[in-house]
Image (spheres, rainbow, N blue to C red):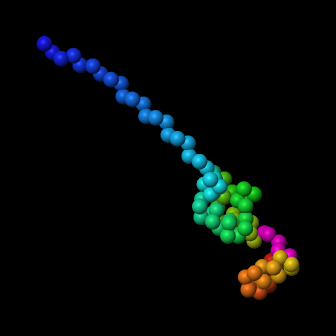
Amino acid sequence: MRPEITYRAPRAAAPAAPRAVTPAAAPGVTPAVQQLADALGMNVKNLTGTGTGGRVTTRDVRRAADDQVINDSQAAQLAQMTGVPAEAFRRG
């Protein structure tokens, strides 16, 4: 007499838990871009990305920082805080 063989269907894998999205891991922003933006006081949410798929690149952050106008009082404050001459912070 042969033993009875039963076949079981493979069990489906449990769905993965969703990952929490942190500001540094926001879509279109790499950690390096976020770090640069933070260092320059920029908010990447206000930038238009020119990278693949609309990603914000370091070039986008640097261009936006260059486009910011710094007035004399802001330059003076930065100079006092950093010890760098105010002329270094003025644009134009």
Q: Which residues are magenta?
A: 67-71
Which quarter of the rendering shows the N terminus?
A: top left
Asked if 35 appears above or below 72 in the picture, the reply is above
Q: Position of residue 14 (x, y in %)?
A: 46, 35
Q: Position of residue 81 (x, y in %)?
A: 75, 81
Q: Residue at x 75, y 57 (%)?
A: 46
Q: Position of residue 70 (x, y in %)?
A: 82, 74
Which quarter of the rendering shows the C terminus?
A: bottom right
Is 89 magenta? The answer is no
Q: Residue furthest top?
A: 1
Q: Residue at x 21, y 16 (%)?
A: 4
Tell whether 3 sits left or right of 92.
left
Asked if 50 appears above or below 82 in the picture, the reply is above
Q: Residue at x 73, y 61 (%)?
A: 43
Q: Residue at x 33, y 23 (%)?
A: 8
Tell whether 17 sits left or right of 65.
left
Tell whether 26 sits left or right of 42.
left
Chief SS of the magenta region: loop
Q: Nearer the viewer, residue 58 or 43?
A: 43
Asked if 14 appears above or below 85 in the picture, the reply is above
Instruction: Tell me if residue 56 can be seen.
Output: yes
Rendering quarter of residue 51:
bottom right
Tell whether 74 sits left or right of 60.
right
Rendering quarter of residue 60:
bottom right
Rendering quarter of residue 73:
bottom right
Q: Residue furthest left?
A: 1
Asked if 47 appears above or below 11 in the picture, the reply is below
Q: Position of residue 37 (x, y in %)?
A: 68, 65
Count of labels in the image: 0
Instruction: Tell me if residue 48 can be seen.
Output: no
